[in-house]
Image (spheres, helix red, strand yellow):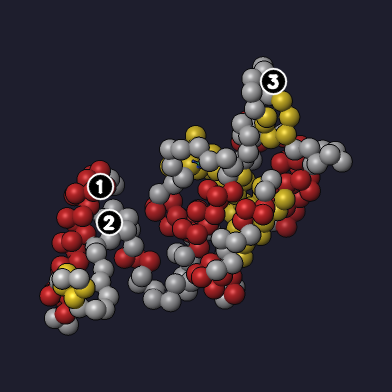
Amino acid sequence: MTIEILCAVPELLASPFEHSIMKRAQERGLLNIKTHNLRKWAINKHAQIDDYQYGGGAGMVMMCEPLANAIDELQLEGKFDEIIFVTPDGKRFEQKEANTLSLKNRVLIICGHYKGIDQRIRDLYVTQEISIGDYVLSGGELAAAVIIDAVGRLIPGVINDETSALTDSFQDNLLAPPVYSRPAEFRGLAVPPVLLTGDPKKVDAWRQDQALQRTKDRRPDLLTRE
Ligand code: ADE
């Protein structure tokens, strides 16, 4: 899968993909992440990519031309399956969306800054608008990093233990059960005895029950979701 990012501050994306699972995914050729600096398509030698908004008001808007020229040029190599704009007024990003995106071939993520991007780019190019939560970040880069991490780890072969991603929180609209490692007792707290029985059926039943309890306590809304 190839994920390309079009943004004004590519430096913000230098580190998140250079470690751990995202690094391995790229080394194995399963995930290709390309960052494009929007200033390459700036309208003048001052590297301008934003301008005042029509109608007045505080805050600059990312202009049409740099974005349109960048997307057109990137699409000369082939159409994107999705062109995503990350924005607080988009649809809330959830595990289901991560699953769907992990099946695409080539995706572009556009990151906004300031007041956002000219609406005509959203009308003409964008196929999905995604928010990572009800709060406002200073730019879309970190939101893009969150989405890419959530999607990248779902690509088959990226996580060693194939079943691991399927048992994550949210995959069945359930939170994940508690997990334990050595030692069997720590500061007076023992590992639940069922986990030491070596009986996979009992362990599975316990985990299922714990996941359900945890979801009821913390996120009852998940239990009534499709
Ligand atoms: N850009 C700024 N805030 C954002 C958010 N919450 N989600 C996605 N993109 C954003």
Q: Which mark is residue 219?
A: 1
Residue 183, quarter of the rendered image: bottom left
The mark that comes first in sequence, 2 or 1, is: 2
- Mark 1 Cα-neighbour bin, 10 Å: few <14, some 14–19, many ≥20: some
Rounded to the nearest whole Å, what is the CA distance between mark 2 and mark 1?
8 Å
Q: Secondary structure at mark 3?
A: loop
Q: Residue at x 26, y 55 (%)?
A: 174
The mark that comes first in sequence, 1 or 3, is: 3
Q: Residue at x 58, y 44 (%)?
A: 140
- Mark 2 Cα-neighbour bin, 10 Å: few <14, some 14–19, many ≥20: many
Residue 110, position in %: x, y?
62, 45
Residue extending furthest toward the bottom? 198
Residue 153, position in %: x, y?
47, 65
Residue extending furthest toward the top? 55
The mark that comes first in sequence, 3 or 2, is: 3
Pointer 2 residue Cβ closer than 8 Å to ligand 1: no
For the residues labelled 2 and 1, say whether their Cβ atoms are less than 8 Å apart.
yes
Q: Secondary structure at mark 2?
A: loop
Residue type at mark 2?
Leu
57 relative to 129 in the view: left or right: right
The residue at which mark 3 appears reads as 54
Of residues 189 and 52, the one nearer the viewer is 189
Q: Secondary structure at mark 1?
A: loop
The residue at which mark 2 appears reads as 175
Residue extending furthest toward the front? 187
Q: Residue at x 21, y 73 (%)?
A: 186
Residue type at mark 3?
Tyr
Residue type at mark 1?
Arg
